[in-house]
Image: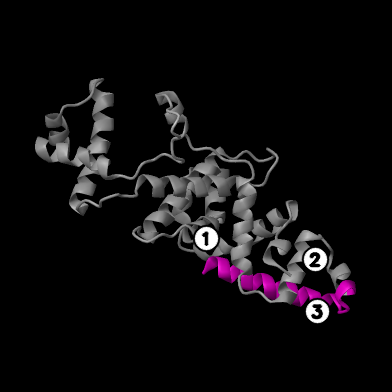
């Protein structure tokens, strides 16, 4: 049975992916209670703590050379916090289905914005971030664009160093999602390419990828069990009758399979 056949479902796929993500979250709960505080009290904070494993699993899937995994993990958790703050229960979908596109999109935007064509020295990268932060603060205070001297005073750097740090942006990779065609577009049309959007089916693709990752290396019997339980939505007794085994055996097989898939997602 092919992997695509196993995970070619809709509601049941969400059930399985959600179940795996919920259990993967347990790996980070013991020492990560503080992460929930960043989302505020109440429901949002509880959702963050309960789904840390989901954010970490998505961070691992987006690990790329040249980027510190810990940075990607923290960005994923920021996306989780945003999802928890925006989520409204009873809106027609569960939290996992709502959070996955938000977290994945946050990671992808971070990777896009932090990709360098030519990597400058780390000290210059750090100064660039400091100048960017100082500029935002000074614009609010002064009601105008700050001068290089004012930015230098705020960051402890010389005007020349500030100018060099601001020029670092030219070394960043282009943010366009797709290339412009040769017909020539206006600035408004060009900007439209830079607006992040959630494409139709994006959520389903993300969930399928999560299940496919958890199923990697699974046997034919395990894939069949997943299909019968989560695609065909058969009960354990129906699966037992289909396979010619006892319901207790089916229960043990499913528990063993799901435990292995959860460990794979949490690894």
Q: Which residue is mark 1?
A: 57
Residue 154 position in % (x across, y down): 17, 35
Q: In the depicted view, which residue is nearer to us: 223 or 102?
A: 223
Q: How dense is the environment of label 2, judged by Cα within 10 Å: few (below 14), some, or many (20 and up)?
A: some
Q: Looking at the rendered structure, which numbered label has been put on residue 178?
A: none
Residue 203 belongs to the span the image colors magenta: no
Residue at 28% over, 31% down: 136
Of pointers 2 and 3, the one earlier in the residue sequence: 2
Magenta: main secondary structure equals helix
Q: Which residue is mark 3?
A: 249
Q: In the depicted view, which residue is nearer to us: 49 or 178?
A: 178
Mark 1 near mark 3, Cβ–Cβ under 8 Å?
no
Residue 125 visible in image: yes
Question: To which quarter of the image does residue 167 belong?
Answer: top left
Extreme residue in the top direction: 143
Residue 13 position in % (x across, y down): 70, 56
Residue at 46% over, 40% down: 178
Residue 38 visible in image: no
Q: Disc 3 on helix, strand or loop?
A: helix
Up-down: is 245 above or below 186?
below
Q: How far apart are the alpha carbons under marks 1 and 2?
A: 25 Å
Q: How dense is the environment of label 1, judged by Cα within 10 Å: few (below 14), some, or many (20 and up)?
A: many
Where does the magenta region start and end?
241-267
Q: Disc 2 on helix, strand or loop?
A: helix
- Marks 1 and 3: which is nearer the front? 1
Residue at 57% over, 49% down: 100
């Amino acid at each position: 049975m092919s992997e695509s056949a196993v995970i070619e479902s809709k509601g049941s796929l969400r059930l399985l992916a959600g179940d795996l993500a919920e259990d993967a979250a347990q790996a980070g709960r013991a020492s990560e209670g503080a992460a929930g505080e960043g989302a505020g009290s109440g429901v949002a904070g509880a959702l963050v703590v309960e789904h840390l494993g989901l954010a970490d699993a998505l961070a691992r899937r987006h690990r790329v050379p040249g980027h510190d995994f810990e940075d990607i993990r923290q960005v994923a958790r920021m996306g989780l916090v945003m999802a928890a703050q925006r989520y409204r229960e009873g809106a027609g979908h569960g939290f996992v289905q709502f959070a996955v596109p938000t977290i994945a999109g946050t990671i992808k935007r971070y990777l896009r914005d932090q990709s360098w064509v030519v990597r400058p020295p780390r000290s210059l990268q750090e100064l660039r971030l400091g100048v960017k932060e100082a500029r935002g603060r000074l614009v609010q205070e002064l009601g105008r664009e700050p001068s290089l001297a004012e930015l230098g005073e705020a960051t402890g750097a010389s005007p020349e160093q500030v100018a060099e740090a601001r020029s670092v942006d030219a070394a960043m990779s282009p943010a366009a999602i797709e290339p412009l065609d040769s017909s020539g577009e206006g600035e408004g049309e060009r900007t439209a390419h830079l607006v992040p959007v959630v494409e139709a089916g994006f959520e389903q693709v993300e969930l399928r990828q999560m299940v496919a990752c958890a199923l990697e290396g699974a046997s034919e019997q395990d894939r069949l069990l997943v299909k019968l339980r989560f695609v065909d939505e058969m009960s354990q007794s129906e699966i037992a009758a289909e396979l010619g085994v006892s319901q207790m055996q089916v229960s043990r097989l499913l528990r063993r399979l799901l435990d292995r898939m959860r460990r794979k997602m949490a690894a």
